[in-house]
Amino acid sequence: MSAKKFTSGDCVQLKSSGPVMVVKEFDTAFQEYICVWFADGKPTTALFKEETLARA
């Protein structure tokens, strides 16, 4: 992956729908974005490939 499409603080959403998430950082080891969102009032994090995300 050359240039990253998203940067820390960007609001994103899965292309297939779902909650709006905030990009926390890019994990160079996995080549995925670490995103944060709230589920049932608790912060949740997960890794996502760039091609699965769209700007929210």
Image (spheres, rainbow, N blue to C red):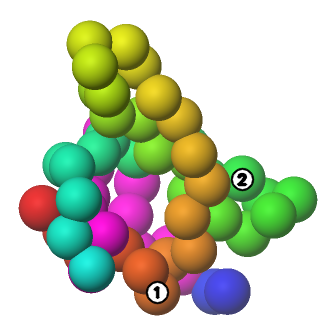
Which of 30 and 38 lies nearest the eye of the viewer? 38
Q: Quadrant of the N terminus?
A: bottom right
**Which residue is drawn at the image coordinates 42% and 35% (left, top)?**
36
Extreme left residue here? 56
Residue neighbourhood size for the residue with mark 2, other residues' Cα within 10 Å, grouped as few (<14), some (14–19), many (≥20): few
At label 2, the amino acid type is Asp
Quarter of image, res 6 = bottom left
Q: Which residue is mark 2?
A: 27
| Comes first in the chain, label 1 or label 2 | 2
Instruction: Give the overall secondary structure of the magenta segment.
Output: loop
User: What is the secondary structure assignment of the residue under circle 2?
Assistant: strand
Q: Quadrant of the C terminus?
A: bottom left
Which of 51 and 4 lies nearest the eye of the viewer? 51
Q: Which residue is mark 1?
A: 51
The stretch in magenta equals 3-15
Total marks placed: 2
Quarter of image, res 14 = bottom left
Q: Is residue 32 left or right of residue 19?
A: right
Residue 17 in percent (x, y) is at: 20, 70
Extreme front residue here? 40
Q: Is residue 40 left or right of residue 25?
A: left
